[in-house]
Amino acid sequence: MEDAIRALQLALELHDPGEREHAERVAVYAVATGEKLGMSDEDLIHLRRAGQLHDVGKIAVDRVILRKMGTLTEQDFEDLKKHADAAVDVLSAFPWLSPSVPMIRSHHERWDGMGYPRGLEGDEIPLGGRILAVAEAFDVMVSGSAWRRPLDPEDACMEIRDCSGTQFDPNVVAAFLSVQPLIQPLGQA
């Protein structure tokens, strides 16, 4: 199973460099948050796998869009948004990943219902998806990107807190903020 996860991560890494490290950091943040929220050991395993593979659907997104510097066009963003559903197609070949798939598919949903791909809101969003949303947002903020300079962890936490109740589940935000200072993400000494 772990070999299959590594193979999928490698395929994504070849398509979009840097994704494997990002996915591993997201998994670390997500599992720590899930533990704080009292998830079972079995659910934490599925959450870790979801974190490791949350962006695997980007394999179906044009590399030009993934590597584009600056703001995406409306059409580019529409194409990028398809990665959440594309992940479902990619991962359907692995029945043992089926508990992780709803988490992956929903990691861009928003607490207020303004997310994608299905516009779910509140508790309609699987808990794992709500956790991944916070974990991924934090990692993107502190790692930076082609269109955004990295923030220090304190500023990223303030931004996460500011989005509590709109973009993010307030309970997940509280759990994440309580464990974030204790987490030593991969690749940082």
Image: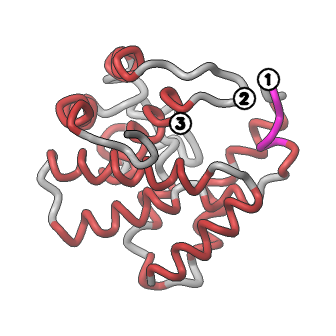
Above or below, 60 relative to 178: below
Image quadrant assignment for residue 178: top left
Q: Are marks 1 and 2 in contact (CB under 8 Å)?
A: yes
Give the residue number, with chain letter if any, for mark 1.
70
- Quadrant placement of the N terminus: bottom left
The number of numbered badges drawn on the structure is: 3
Give the residue number, with chain letter if any, for mark 2.
146
Identity, as a three-letter code, of the amino acid under mark 3: Gly
Helix, strand or loop at label 3? It is loop
Identity, as a three-letter code, of the amino acid under mark 2: Ala
Look at discs 3 and 2 and give the one toward the viewer. Answer: 2
Give the residue number, with chain letter if any, for mark 3.
115
| Residue toward you, 103 or 66 | 66
Describe residue 144's horizontal placement relative to residue 122 as left or right. right
Question: Residue 180 location in percent, x, y?
Answer: 26, 34
Q: Label 3, label 2: how many angstroms apart (C-alpha)?
A: 22 Å
